[in-house]
Amino acid sequence: MRGVIDGQTLRQSTLPMPSPLQQLLDLPLAGDLLILTHDNPDPDSISSAAAMQHLLRIKRGVHSVIGYSGVVGRAENRAMVDLLELPIVPLQRIDRNAFAHIALIDAQPETGNHALSADRIPDIVIDHHPLREATRRARFFDVREELGASASLMTLYLREASVEIPESLATALLYGIRSETQDLVREVSDDDIEAFELLFPFANWSLLAQIARPRLDKAYFSQLARAIGALEVGREIAVARLGEVNDPDFVPEIADLIVRMVDMQWGLCTGSVREKLYVSIRTNDPSAEAGELMRRILTGLGSGGGHGMRGGGNVNINSTGRSRAEIELEIASRFAHERGASPGELQYFDKGEPSQ
């Protein structure tokens, strides 16, 4: 579903419909813009936000700041931000009231994975996840579920606008597409491939190699060892209940890892940082609906969503009146039931003992 300006769908007009890019560039913006990523932003969200900032600065002269909540936790993500000197700012250092406009990038209103308050309607929404009804209230939105990455959409915007893409931004966008689509093999469209090919000659491949293979501290390996020890494996599903983790990014990272196991079709990983429990689902089935499965599993507990092969969500532990361990077990049980696993099927990976 593409652009809406001031709540009036251009499809109802007898005039030729401007392209989504033209609708965006025609949007009245009088004042500074806050560009928000989703919580604990990944390379797709960060690079897409940087592309939006670049586009609106060049074409409209808009001053903007990129803000994020949570942390940039995964080593690869930190390396991308540091090596490419991407201008993202923690929200606690930003006065949100100082901005006349807000853009929400790689996320949508009322999804529970960003810091936009429920009573604040964003001016701009860019995303590649299933369209949420609340998004329709935005002055402009371009939500393309068929794309594998928001970075692909922003790359095509830059090309259509004839805006030169600096090397650092090209490198960031290329890595955003690579990481989000797992090197163009997961939920990839022709537009993603086209965007990748457009960026390819302008990216810094030496920096890309450093981003993809960053140095890892000892705490990472300690956490990884605990994750392997917590792994429970069935015939086609695996579950990792991690308890406390160092950063939220570790949860989807382990979910990505466990579905690489031979014969494994589905993986679930949970882990908490302070009062919030993070949940990730991955599957190797391209026809699956992991996002819908995530929403069912978190019903009555928290919020979530995703794509066909990926799902993510979170639970505010304090709001449930239950312990973290109880919630993790409940989510794992719901997941196993949804995937048709028999009682007692899951066994600890390292000991071969039935899970409790």
Image: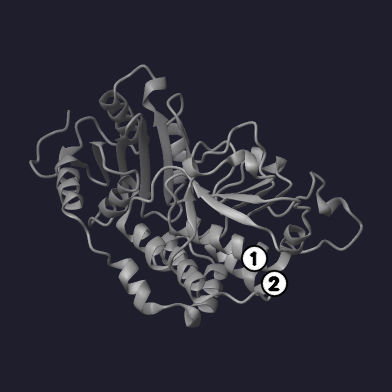
Classed neighbour count for the residue bearing mark 2: other residues with Cα under 10 Å, few (<14), some (14–19), many (≥20): some
The reply, left or right, for residue 280 in relation to residue 221 is: right
Badge number at residue 89 = none
Residue that sits furthest to the bottom in the current view:
201
Residue drawn at (54%, 53%), measured in percent from left and top? Answer: 66
Q: Position of residue 47 (x, y in %)?
A: 50, 61
Residue drawn at (37%, 43%), measured in percent from left and top? Answer: 280
Rendered view: 134 above or below 310: above
Which amino acid type is shown beneath numbered disc 2? Ala
Q: Within the image, what quadrant is residue 327 found in?
A: top left
Badge number at residue 55 = 1
Badge number at residue 161 = 2
Residue drawn at (40%, 30%), measured in percent from left and top? Answer: 315
Residue 205 appearing in the image: yes
Asked whether disc 1 touches disc 2, contact meaning CB atoms under 8 Å apart, the reply is yes
Q: Position of residue 14 (x, y in %)?
A: 92, 57
